[in-house]
Amino acid sequence: MNILDIGCGKEKYPGSIGVDISDKTDADVIHDLNTIPYPFDDNTFDCIICDNVIEHLDDVIKTMDKLWRISKNGARIKISVPYFRSVYASIDPTHQHFFTYNSFYYFDERHIFNKLYKYSDSIFEVEKVSFDESISSNVLHKCIKYIANKRPQFYEINISHLFPLNELTFHLKTIK
């Protein structure tokens, strides 16, 4: 299985090819992720991991187009980003984009957002969206996280401003 870790930093996913802009990371490939094209052939990767990197890049749509090009049909894409209401979303001055539960449905042909606003020809199925997938702390956090993951629209509209969670993880599948 060919795995690519985009913006791997110093914690590259085991067994993956890491790509990052800095040579002070665990990257196998040094590349500015805002530069087109990515230095990989079409249809190369079975899995792509983007752990807290997309919010730093110039253009989310172009980034998704690049990921679509280098991923195989059926490839799994895992994207973790700060939730837009999280203090971590706006505390970092290098963050350029903010994400909600629905942000990646624009790339899913089954969703109304894709039908109304066709920003890209790259297609991904949104298989799962999770709040704070790898974060757990106290009982209140666990309860809010449970509600958010069971009723995400309700949480986002009615509760998230009172009890903001930290991170969203999108599990996508490349469709070609």
Image (cartoon, rainbow, N blue to C red):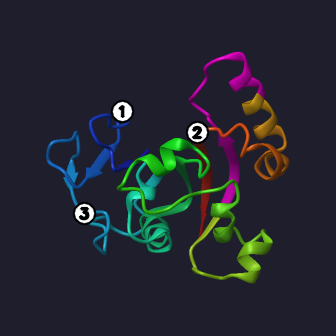
- Residue under circle 1? 14
Q: Name the N-terminal-most of marks 3 and 1.
A: 1
> Quick one: quadrant of the C terminus?
bottom right
Query: Between residues 54 and 88, which one lies in front from this camera angle?
Result: 88
- Which kind of residue does numbered mark 1 sit on? Pro
Residue 48 visible in the picture = no
Give the magenta-colored segment's residue range: 125-143
Secondary structure, mark 3, is loop
Would you say 23 lies left or right of 19 here? left
Would you say 87 lies left or right of 57 here? right
| Cα–Cα span, label 1 and label 2 | 25 Å
- Residue under circle 3? 32
Q: Residue at x 69, y 81 (%)?
A: 117
Query: Hey, which quadrant is residue 10 in on the image?
Result: top left
Q: In the figure, 176 relative to 166: above or below?
A: below
Q: Which residue is drawn at 78% across and 69% down?
A: 110
Query: Between residues 76 and 50, which one lies in front from this camera angle?
Result: 50
Q: Which mark is residue 166?
A: 2
Q: Name the N-terminal-most of marks 2 and 3.
A: 3
Q: Which mark is residue 83?
A: none
| Mark 1 and mark 2 residues within 8 Å of each other at the beta carbon | no
For discs 1 and 2, the disc positioned in front in the rendered view: 2
Q: In the figure, 30 relative to 116: above or below?
A: above
Question: Is 70 included in the stretch rendered in magenta?
Answer: no
- Point out residue 38 in the picture as x, y percentages from the top left corner: 31, 67
